[in-house]
Image (cartoon, grey):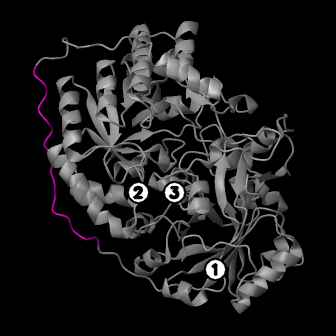
Amino acid sequence: MDAQKVLTANAIKKPELLAPAGSFEAVCAAVYSGCNAVYLGGKGFNARANASNFELDEMKRAADLCRLFKVKLYITMNTILYDRELRAALRYASELAEKISPDAFIIQDIGFASMLHKNLPDMPLHASTQMRLHSADASDLLKEIGITRIVLAREMNLSDIKKAAASGVETEVFVHGALCVSQSGGCLMSSMIGKRSGNRGECAQPCRLPYKSANRFPLSLKDLCLAGSVTKLMDSGVTSLKIEGRMKSPDYVAGVVSVYRRLIDKKRDATKEEMLYLDRLFSRQGFTDGYLFSKPGRNMFGYRTETDKITSKESSKKLDYYPLLKSRPEFCNQPPSPTVYTINEPQDKVIDYIKPLNYDVFRFYGDIPKDIKFPEPAAYIDIPLWKINKIPHDYAKGNIKIRVIMPAVCTDSDKAVVVKLLSNAKDEGISDLVITNLSQLNLCDGMGFSLHGDIALNAVNELTLDFYKDKLSTIALSPEVGIGALKSMKKPLPVELVVYGKLPLMYTENCIIESAENKNCDRNRTNCKFMLTDRTGAVFPIFREYAHRNVIFNSVPLYLLDKKKELKQCGISGKIYLFTDEKSDKIKSVIKMGEQSSTAVKPFTRGYFQ
């Protein structure tokens, strides 16, 4: 079936309405208000560690209720997992498959997905938005490890959503709730500042805090509300419309689900009264329609005011506006029997070691000084793809190669420009490419590049490395991996690690410089830079990225240049020096410290390498 027929066939069916639940009461609210599916998490391995979440017995009650009303139940196991956790996570998933019989697991970690599919071969797996999928290009690869649905990244516009929906894989889009200012799955800010990882469900939400700028809340986005565009989403052919809010109250869940249920059933968009009702339930100075119509900008930003809080509190007492259904007898026939899943005996994956190499990578997000001399083990100079016209080619001599780094996001709307830039890179003799996203494997396949993996791939365990070993020449490990995990991790391909530099904490679809300065930015400028200062006085450099997106870097550099012995023991092949706002003298000094394994002058951070 061609793409248009797939799109038409999908659009004929009503999309699933998927509701959040952080408690059993929220499950009841969602089911009685008319959802088609509920997603929830257990006490571990899910990206809302601070929600109430579910013990096994309570989850069984939730599953029984959902089954009675023919509502599907999806369980979130959507965090990155370290090697020491994989077997426990597998045991937990197997127990849930046997006792709860969910309709799918929602997964972030590629390695864990591979493991889960091998041991629960007929269990549907949904790729979490944390997997950073901005197109359906990776669908064939994902199908091989049991992925049946892609939760599309929130940054996609309607045109890109339609293309993904027509690809033949199930697609799910967020239609209501909180928005991360960081591109989906790419935030390290909470993790690197306070050791509370968003990829581990522990985010401290630094994006909601005030900063010292013209706009005191330059990182806080309004909540998403696409109730005014339900008909367009239904026509797009997506499988599921998803509401965010596992941290929200049952009243909130009931109110939001009931509105979207009515809109889907009548195939219409929300009225002004319905939009006002949703706003009063919960908002941050109103709503945004996000990136659906490709209009990011200052109007997307807002924070939770005291007035918002008072309005929400009062509105929660007036749910008779959309009363909860006390029963749904039309569904209460014989509930379907739980699915019985095949559970294979767990087997350890045999992963071959490789002998680690010894080379340096010098990555520049800022300008490359012309008078820098790179040391002997230098193998690569990395620069962003969209800066290839600024490469000083006299550096590409001897054994040093230029690697270009793909944009953190590459949607279908971006592809024409990105493919042209890749073609220009090939014409310049560049043969190495750093991918930042799983979907880019398909895009770049056959173009003749040697592919390398970026830290944005969130590789933290050996099963993820095993997944990529035949697809990449090298891969950079996530900076969220500690020294203990690094030492024990089997490495089937050369791995790299950032040993110096201000780590990229966020890649943002919006221009934070524009938000912080509270004025429109010249979008034709290519040298936008800004320093964002928080309440403690920490200063975070912000650089422009491809398509006027931004990168926010840490206020202090990671420093491991005096840990050569430990890095060798950990089997690290490539040491990445990451330069942002450093001047020529500072860069020379850092390179010299690396050659001498010198201890840094503070301030610096060791990150997770303790």
Label 2 sits on residue: 110
604, 523: nearer the viewer: 604
Task: State whether residue 275 appears in this view.
Answer: yes
Q: Position of residue 443 (x, y in %)?
A: 56, 50
Q: Indicate the quadrant where residue 242 lies.
A: top left
Numbered label attached to residue 197: 3
Q: Indicate the quadrant where residue 80 lies.
A: bottom left
SS under mark 3 = loop
SS under mark 2 = helix
User: Which mark sits nearer the N-terminus, 1 or 3?
Assistant: 3
Numbered label attached to residue 433: none
Label 1 sits on residue: 560
| Residue 153 within the magenta-colored segment of the rendering | no
Report how far apart the C-alphas of labels 1 and 3 lie in the structure: 21 Å
Circles 1 and 2 in contact, beta carbons < 8 Å: no
Q: Indicate the quadrant where residue 217 lies.
A: top right
Q: Position of residue 498 (x, y in %)?
A: 62, 72
User: Which mark sits nearer the N-terminus, 1 or 2?
Assistant: 2
92, 347: nearer the viewer: 92
What span is colored magenta in the figure?
Answer: 334-349
For image coordinates 21% across by 46% down, the residue present is 56
